[in-house]
Amino acid sequence: MLTARTEQVPVREQHDIVSVRQVVRSWCLNLGLGLVDLTKLVTAASEIARNTVEYGGGGTLVLEELRDGLRTGIRLVFEDQGPGIPDLDRALTDGYSTGTGMGLGLGGTRRLVDEFDVSSTPGVGTRVAITKWKTR
Amino acid sequence: MDRIPILRMGPVLLVSIQVDMHDELALTLQDDLTNAITTHGARGVLIDISAVSVVDSFMGRMLANIAGIARVLDATTVVVGMQPAVAITLVELGLSLEGVRTALNVEKGMAHLQAVVASAEVFSDSSDDADGAH
């Protein structure tokens, strides 16, 4: 698998969540993702960016354009150096939330993307990577 | 722009969201609408989201909150014009916007609100008559 292009954007405060939505949207349009896939990926990015700001104390997003044979896709990697998620399994369960969100946890976000990878170390930080492939 | 304008048309308040809202702007709209309902004694709230390309859980909660607050203040809320891709995404995310009445477009939303307002007037007229009889 090949990474054709990358871009890094800050995810530090509320206004950055809007910027994240905009940059992800422009990458999706650039890659020619369909409207439904675009909407799902932008929404998923918005959810995770808010977690990064609210629970992670801010962090970064790295966008990657992926080439895998004939497939192309976008991977979004969110990283923060926050307190981490103590119980990942619970955080991935629908309806679990400790903050001011909808109580959807990460479970709902996972359904919006093709690949979802989260790793978290208490006291060190959290990394969430989501990938959406272009459907041919 | 730090405020979404609220227009008044008789007993109905109209809001059309035309920007990508940051969280604080969404909360400001919630507060402004709550105040406008009480100030004007509004009976209906129509929120047009046809220009909104992403509704995440935060904005979904804001819409549900507005509908809930309005209901407690005796007003009906209708959210209109949701884009199909947004509807698909919301349901897959696990948000069905329960308690939020929706309509396909502004025209249908207004027709619903006018019907609600009209039936409420009939109800209050008849209770006035009953009072008069005593």
Image (cartoon, coloured by chain):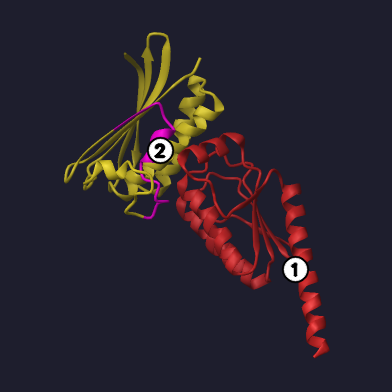
The kind of residue on which mark 1 rests is Ala
Question: Residue drawn 58% across and 42% down?
Answer: B52
Q: How many marks?
A: 2
Residue closer to the observer: B56 or A26: B56
* Residue A47 percent across, percent down from the top left: 41, 42
Among the chains pictured, the one given yellow colouring is: A
At x 61%, y 38%, the residue is B83
For the residue carrying disc 1, how many other residues have a C-alpha within 10 Å: few (<14), some (14-19), or many (20+)?
few
Q: In the image, is A123 to the left or to the right of B130?
A: left
User: Can residue B10 be spotted in the picture?
Assistant: no
Which of the chains bears the disc numbered 1?
Answer: B
Calculate the distance from the C-alpha at mark 1 to the C-alpha at mark 2: 41 Å
Q: Which residues are magenta?
A: A100-117
Q: In which chain is the residue bearing label 2?
A: A
Q: Does the magenta portion include B124?
A: no
Q: Are marks 1 and 2 on the same chain?
A: no
- What's the mark number on residue B120? 1
Q: Colour of chain B?
A: red
